[in-house]
Image: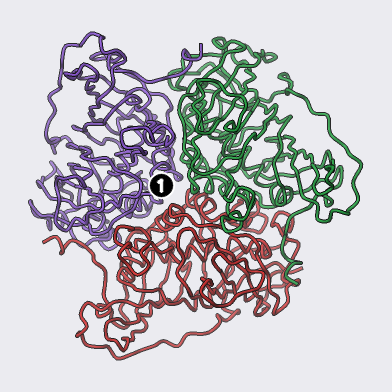
Chain colours: A green, B red, C purple
Amino acid sequence: MSASKTNRGRFFEDFRIDETIAHATPRTVGEGERALYIALTGSRFALPGSDEFARRLGLPAAPLDDMLVFNLIFGRSVPDVSLNAIANLGYADGRFGAAVYPGDTLSAHSRVIGLKENSNRETGVVYLRTTGLNQRGETILDYVRWVMVRKRERAAPSPDPLVPKLPDVVASDALTLPAGLDLSGYDAGLAGSPFYWDDYAVGERIDHVEGMTIEESCHMTATRLYQNSARVHFNQHAEKDGRFARRIVYGGHVISLARALSFNGLASAFRIAAINGGRHLNPCFAGDTVYAWSQVMEKHDLPGRDKVGALRLRTYAAKDHPCGDFPTGGADVLLEFDYLAILPRR
Amino acid sequence: MSASKTNRGRFFEDFRIDETIAHATPRTVGEGERALYIALTGSRFALPGSDEFARRLGLPAAPLDDMLVFNLIFGRSVPDVSLNAIANLGYADGRFGAAVYPGDTLSAHSRVIGLKENSNRETGVVYLRTTGLNQRGETILDYVRWVMVRKRERAAPSPDPLVPKLPDVVASDALTLPAGLDLSGYDAGLAGSPFYWDDYAVGERIDHVEGMTIEESCHMTATRLYQNSARVHFNQHAEKDGRFARRIVYGGHVISLARALSFNGLASAFRIAAINGGRHLNPCFAGDTVYAWSQVMEKHDLPGRDKVGALRLRTYAAKDHPCGDFPTGGADVLLEFDYLAILPRR
Amino acid sequence: MSASKTNRGRFFEDFRIDETIAHATPRTVGEGERALYIALTGSRFALPGSDEFARRLGLPAAPLDDMLVFNLIFGRSVPDVSLNAIANLGYADGRFGAAVYPGDTLSAHSRVIGLKENSNRETGVVYLRTTGLNQRGETILDYVRWVMVRKRERAAPSPDPLVPKLPDVVASDALTLPAGLDLSGYDAGLAGSPFYWDDYAVGERIDHVEGMTIEESCHMTATRLYQNSARVHFNQHAEKDGRFARRIVYGGHVISLARALSFNGLASAFRIAAINGGRHLNPCFAGDTVYAWSQVMEKHDLPGRDKVGALRLRTYAAKDHPCGDFPTGGADVLLEFDYLAILPRR
């Protein structure tokens, strides 16, 4: 009788193309989330940390950090999508919408947009588009992810394979800027960098220099903050018998650390507007020290905007490997994260 | 001279029947406590996490989590009651009153309602009724606990033994529901469970499946959040020579984890209305992974209410022991917690 | 090209006498910082924790804890001042100004007031006066610190040595009390101590009794909360090859723990008004248990104030060393911190 009350997570054969899954646990976010995000990642970006800085840019208050929003929306989807996931394979076509302010309530749903069973017939890949909304129904974030999920029974019938076509890069003319944004009051000194969009060159590589060591308590606290309940992050008693014999750090925490480290070199990249793609190349564990570096991939004007421009950046995170040699692969590279960031123009 | 300024805690002979002890350090609670509680326990209940969900239920905002309130009130009493406690033996007759909202200031006092020296004459049991109030003087929580406390001097005279008579179960017709509660806007999907009060059967057992590993930093941070200053939770230098050679996890943190884990199977139990009884059966330490299961003990109508009902639930927490076998005793069972929860009716 | 975007910190020869450095990353503080500070230090002072207690004292709300403010202002200065610091040598002449309330935005700048190269020509001492401001431009804190900083090149020319003259003790008639402060509603029971300013005697020593063990996660989370990015606190991969082979606990966290522990004996010292001097005598590491004791050095009337007085206190923190023997030196004394605290008078 108990099994009937308990969610043990969906298996591959439980997903149907075009099905929409409404995720539970709407979440009001505020000053507590802002302070905790800073305390768990060390982020120093001025916009999500200062109401005054935000008002200078025409916004009503400091919006929540973009990656905090990403992780909160991702967290909503975990109990429905990835409780039985083996691996979170990638992200693409992510767009941030309305800025999130303290007092907003976030909710999320996901639509199944692709299914492909693996040849071993024991697992399959599920593609979903997850949409995060605020309490007014405005989209705050929309992205695709794909995960490898176990089948409940090997013999379950295989769905027709459908792999969605996804863009390599989100079109820069489709980006949403926070309502009211006006750069006339931008203060480079307060932001922490003398460099504007104009000062970055395509191909340029930036070593973010510092490293952050991850403790079990830190990554678990961050992941619980997002209400991401995937068991691999929390349960040492079970994981001691798992593939790595230990808990795995949630990949979104690694993205957040890489973004926080990127302040040193990219402090003026005040807004992440789109996620082109992201992949977790190796698992991360407590005790690892995360370093990061970034490359400028493209530069984009924004239509009708002469005070801001977009950089397409690719940030890599590596463990126990200072990034002065700009690593892109190998056993110690954790993350490749390709995104569009907004910077002020001169 | 220094001893005169320092509180070294009360001993058994310092308690007098009917004495009321006003506890220090009133505490304003808000968004920070809400976010930290989620981050430290992983709680996913919709009501304490979402202002919008709360407003759908007729409340002005998301109330603070019931067990957060319990732990905050308990914390007030520690410096006066249990600094020299050997063990927190049990809880009973607990009733939650007015809901607590961000901005409220909590204070507490305790009345000594029982005393019984142990036959070894070195310790005794103190029974107290602790009452938590908000800034308007409304009772937010009222409960009895009993603790074993050291005597300062073995030869101190023994008080007449008085053991209060306590109910096994709080009367369900004495429960307080949050002012304004109206279930007409209840959304089972947002709450995270399709199951209503009607769907639970007396005797039913629910394995909450997941486990949460406790780190030193996590339990200490939670316990400090409650301003519970009992030394056994914090001081490894002293505890290395103590009974267990290590710090002990505060029992209230174990209750909070068990309640958070119970979301999987009891997501619709949106409010704890009463604590019938609670016992910590074994000590918990950092490194332990907490699992939980619950049994439905009784079902109660609530007078004049057709949209909500109460379940009497008994939740057990166990360490390093998945609860599919529904353990009720043995060296790895940490907690037996018997309470009345409010659920929506169909 | 990347080096041009990355801040690698100033070296000794980059500082000029009388230069003013505006620090980046203004920070709005609020309920999240308040809750986290309590959760990370265990502070139990009533004033920063209770809006109601604050209103009884004539203030609009609970001000942020004084040492939280100190650590936040200190954190602003780190990227510009002490990224290449070998040691934070001392503090002096610190004065707290306007009280800080939730919603305030803090910013900071520092002026170079002294320079002295060391005889080895590889390092030098930089003296700075750091000023913290709120969004109205009011000074909230002003203090001097001096740090030992590496030279980039040994051969760089030596500046004329200038060592500022600093007072041993801040003049008690120059202290700022929070605007509106009125002790007529002071409640000693809520504050947690029956002792008033009148009850303390010059020379009196107070053992604060309790100890707090530091975990890596706790000190890192606190230090990130302050956006202090000094690498020695965070990067085990680099520090494993450093002087101590491990991360060093930020000294400000030790001060905060000592202040929090001092509640037991000094609960009525509701406000730190000035920092006369502070020195970190030995490094602190995760695993250390911090104890503290204080001595009353002086008692001061405050001009025009008959309901409050100042105590000059000297608090020592020691590791793995209970402070009943009042240690002032040796390998396990971490901190000597001399300050002026405000207490109610009878």
Residue named by callout 1: C218
Q: Is residue B60 visible?
A: no
Mark 1 chain:
C
Residue A22 pos. (x, y %) = 76, 49
The crowding category of the residue bearing disc 1, from other C-alpha atoms within 10 Å (few below 14, some 14 to 19, many at least 20), is many
Determine if residue C29 is in view: yes
- Dividing the picture into quadrants, the one containing residue B9 is bottom left
Question: Disc 1 on helix, strand or loop?
Answer: helix
Image coordinates of residue C318 in percent, x first then y, are 22, 49
Task: Report x, y in % for residue B158.
Answer: 25, 88
The answer to which quarter of the image holds residue A162 is top right
Q: Nearer the viewer, residue C320 or B148?
A: C320
Report the side of A200 relative to C308 (left or right).
right
- The residue shown at (68%, 13%) is A304
Q: Quadrant of the C terminus of chain A?
A: top right
The front one of C246 and B281 is C246
